[in-house]
DNA sequence: TTAGGGTTAG
C-alpha cells in the first residue's frame, strides 16, 4: 500500500521514471491491491509512459490477477504498437472470455507472429465460449506455424476439444502425441469425466495413467458427482492419497446437486480450509434447493470469516432473498451489491431483476433489466413472470413480444409468465393460442405450472368442464396447483359437483392444506348445505388439522 | 537483456 505513495524518484537509484514505475509494479506482483495499483497506473499515465510495452504488459497481468479483464484490455488498447509479449499477456488476461480471439485477430494484421506462448491461452478462450469452429481454426494455425509438438500447446488442444464436446478429437490429439505428461492425461480424463455420462471411459483413462496427482483424483470425484453417483464420488474422495480445497469443494457440489444439503454441510464444516468458491457453492446450494434462510445465514457468517463475496456468491444470495420476498431485504441486498462493487454482470443483473420483480417492485426490476446489455431468455423470463404475477399482464406480453422480435427463444419459464398474464387479464383466446404455440412451435412439454395457469384461466372464465378436462389430460397425473385453481373457480361459479371430485383428489395430495378444506366447506355453505360443511370440518378435526396451523405462515 | 504456456471446484 505504501509503495504507490512513493514519488517516482525512488530510493533504489532508478535512473528514470520508467525504471521506478517498473519497480513499483514489481512490488505489486506478490500481492496485488487495486487502490495502489490504480495510483501507480495514474502516475504512469501522468508521466506519459503508457505507451511503454513492458510497463503495459505488467499492468495487464496485474489487472488480470484481480479479475479485471476490462481494465487489462484498456491498458492494452492504449499502446500503439504492442509487442508480442504484450499481445500474449493480453490474450492470457482475456482467456476466460471470447475477446482474446479479437486481440489475436488484430495481431494477425501486424507483422508480429504468434509463438508457443500465444496458443494455449487462445485455446482457453475457445474452450470458455465454447466454440469448436474457433478451436478448429486455431488448431489449423498451430499446425501451420509448427507449434503442435509443444506440450502445453497439445495439452491445451486436448482440453479445448474436451470442453467443446468433441471427445474424438480430444482423444486423437492425445494419441498422436509422442511425449505425454500428467497434464495430458488429466486433460483427457477431464474431457471424459466432466460430463459424467461415460464414467466407464473416464475410469479406463484413470486406471491407465502412469502417474496420478491430486487433479486426476479430483476429476474422478467431479465426474461421479456430475452423474449423480454420490457413493462412488465419496469412495474416490475417501481413497485419494491427498485432498486439497478443490477436492472438498467438488464433493460438496456433488451433494448439493443431488439435494443432500446435510451431507454437503457436514463436509463444509469439517474441511480444513475454505476459500471463496467453497463458501459460494454452499450458499448457492442452499439457494438452489429452496433453503433461502440457510443461504442467508451462511452469507452473514462469511463476513465474520472476513471472506469477500463476488458476483458468483451474490447470485445465490440474491436468489435466496428473492425466495424470501420482502422489500426491505431486497433493498438491503441491492445496496450491498452496489456498495461492495460487485461486478454487475448479466447473471447478477438478472438475479436482481428477478428479486425485485418477485417482491413486486416492478419499477426497480425494469430499471435493472434495462441495465443488461444483451438480455437472454433468463433475464426476459424473470421480468415477464414478475410483471404477470403482479398484475401487469399487458406489460408482460409487450416484453414477450420484444423478446420474440430479438429472436430469443422462450423456454418453459417464459411461458409460465405469458400464460399467467393471459389468465390474469382473462385473455382466453390469446392464452389458448400461446399454449398451442408453446407445444407446437417451441416443442415445450407443458408442466404442472403451465396446466395450473390454463386451468386458472379457464376456471376464471367459468369454463369449469374444459378446465377439469385439461386436468384429467395431464400426463403426470393431477397436480395441486391446477386442482387448487379449479377448486377456487368452483367456489366462484358455485359448482358443487366438480368441487367435490377435485377436493377429494386435493385432500389426498396435500392432506394438511387447510385452505382446500375451507374452500369446500364454504362452497357447501353457500348452498346452505350446512351438514356437508360441518362434515368437512369434522374430517379436518379427525386429521388433526386446525385452521390456525394453516394460517400461521401469515405471521412470519 | 527481461518477462510468460497446459490439467481439477462456483
Image (cartoon, helix red, strand yellow):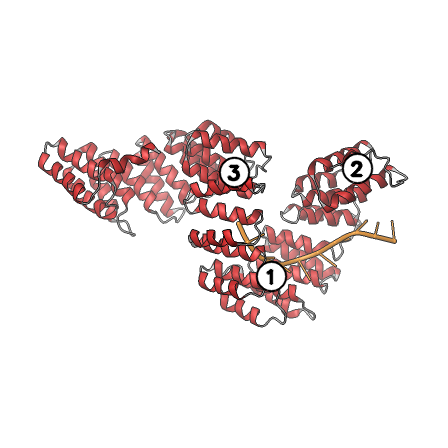
Q: Nearer the viewer, mark 2 or mark 3?
A: 2
Q: Chain of mark 1?
A: A
- Answer left or right for A487 relative to A556: left
Mark 1 or mark 3, which has the lower sequence index? 1
A395 in relation to A345, above or below: above
Mark 2 or mark 3: name the one nearer the start of the chain.
2
**SS of the residue at dot 3?**
loop
Vertical placement of A38 versus A252: above or below? above
Residue at x 55%, y 65% (from the top left corner): A240
Quarter assignment of residue A68:
top right
- Counting from the top left corner in percent of width and height, residue A59 is at 75, 42
For marks 1 and 3, give the CA distance. Answer: 36 Å
Q: Would you call the spot at circle 2 few (<14 residues within 10 Å), some (14-19), or many (20 or more)?
A: many
Query: In the drawing, does residue A556 fall left or right of residue A20?
Result: left
State which quadrant residue A49 falls in: top right
Residue A215: numbered disc = 1
Q: Is residue A458 visible?
A: no
Give the chain letter at badge 2.
Answer: A
Amino acid at each position: 500500500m505504501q509503495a504507490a505513495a512513493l514519488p517516482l524518484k525512488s530510493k533504489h537509484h532508478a535512473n528514470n521514471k520508467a525504471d521506478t514505475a517498473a519497480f513499483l509494479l514489481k512490488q505489486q506482483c506478490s500481492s496485488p491491491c487495486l487502490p495502489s495499483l490504480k495510483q501507480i497506473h495514474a502516475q504512469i499515465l501522468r508521466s506519459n509512459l503508457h505507451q511503454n510495452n513492458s510497463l503495459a504488459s505488467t499492468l495487464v497481468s496485474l489487472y488480470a490477477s484481480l479479475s479485471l479483464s476490462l481494465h487489462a484490455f484498456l491498458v492494452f488498447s492504449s499502446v500503439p504498437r504492442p509487442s508480442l509479449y504484450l499481445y500474449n499477456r493480453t490474450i492470457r488476461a482475456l482467456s476466460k472470455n471470447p475477446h482474446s480471439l479479437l486481440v489475436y485477430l488484430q495481431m494477425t494484421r501486424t507483422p508480429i507472429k504468434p509463438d508457443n506462448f500465444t496458443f494455449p491461452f487462445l485455446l482457453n478462450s475457445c474452450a470458455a465460449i465454447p466454440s469448436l469452429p474457433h478451436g478448429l481454426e486455431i488448431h489449423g494455425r498451430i499446425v501451420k506455424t509448427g507449434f503442435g509438438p509443444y506440450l502445453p500447446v497439445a495439452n491445451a488442444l486436448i482440453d479445448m476439444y474436451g470442453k467443446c464436446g468433441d471427445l474424438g478429437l480430444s482423444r486423437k490429439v492425445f494419441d498422436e502425441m509422442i511425449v505425454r505428461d500428467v497434464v495430458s492425461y488429466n486433460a483427457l480424463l477431464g474431457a471424459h469425466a466432466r460430463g459424467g455420462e461415460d464414467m466407464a471411459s473416464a475410469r479406463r483413462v484413470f486406471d491407465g495413467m502412469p502417474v496420478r496427482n491430486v487433479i486426476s483424483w479430483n476429476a474422478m470425484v467431479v465426474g461421479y458427482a456430475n452423474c449423480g453417483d454420490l457413493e462412488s464420488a465419496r469412495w474416490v474422495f475417501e481413497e485419494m492419497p491427498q485432498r486439497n480445497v478443490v477436492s472438498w469443494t467438488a464433493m460438496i457440489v456433488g451433494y448439493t446437486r443431488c439435494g443432500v444439503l446435510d451431507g454437503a454441510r457436514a463436509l463444509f464444516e469439517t474441511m480444513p480450509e475454505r476459500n471463496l468458491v467453497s463458501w459460494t457453492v454452499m450458499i448457492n446450494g442452499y439457494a438452489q434447493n429452496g433453503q433461502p434462510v440457510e443461504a442467508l445465514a451462511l452469507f452473514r457468517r462469511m463476513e465474520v470469516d472476513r471472506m469477500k463475496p463476488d458476483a458468483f456468491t451474490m447470485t445465490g444470495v440474491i436468489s435466496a432473498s428473492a425466495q424470501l420476498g420482502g422489500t426491505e431485504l431486497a433493498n438491503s441486498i441491492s445496496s450491498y451489491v452496489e456498495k461492495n462493487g460487485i461486478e454487475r454482470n448479466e447473471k447478477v443483473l438478472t438475479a436482481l431483476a428477478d428479486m425485485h420483480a418477485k417482491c413486486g417492485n416492478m419499477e426497480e426490476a425494469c430499471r435493472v433489466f434495462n441495465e443488461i446489455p444483451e438480455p437472454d431468455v433468463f433475464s426476459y423470463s424473470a421480468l415477464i413472470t414478475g410483471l404477470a404475477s403482479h398484475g401487469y399482464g399487458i406489460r408482460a406480453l409487450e416484453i414477450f413480444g420484444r423478446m420474440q422480435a430479438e429472436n430469443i427463444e422462450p423456454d418453459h419459464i417464459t411461458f409460465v409468465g405469458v400464460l399467467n398474464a393471459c389468465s390474469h387479464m382473462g385473455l382466453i383466446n390469446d392464452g389458448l393460442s400461446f399454449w398451442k404455440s408453446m407445444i407446437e412451435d417451441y416443442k415445450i412439454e407443458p408442466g404442472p405450472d403451465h396446466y395450473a395457469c390454463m386451468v386458472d384461466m379457464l376456471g376464471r372464465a367459468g369454463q369449469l368442464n374444459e378446465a377439469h378436462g385439461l386436468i384429467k389430460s395431464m400426463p403426470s397425473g393431477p397436480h395441486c396447483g391446477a386442482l387448487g385453481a379449479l377448486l377456487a373457480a368452483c367456489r366462484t361459479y358455485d359448482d358443487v359437483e366438480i368441487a367435490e371430485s377435485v377436493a377429494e383428489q386435493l385432500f389426498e395430495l396435500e392432506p394438511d392444506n387447510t385452505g382446500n378444506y375451507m374452500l369446500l366447506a364454504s362452497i357447501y355453505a353457500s348452498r346452505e348445505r350446512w351438514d356437508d360443511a360441518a362434515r368437512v370440518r369434522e374430517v379436518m378435526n379427525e386429521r388433526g388439522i386446525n385452521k390456525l396451523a394453516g394460517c400461521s405462515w401469515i405471521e412470519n
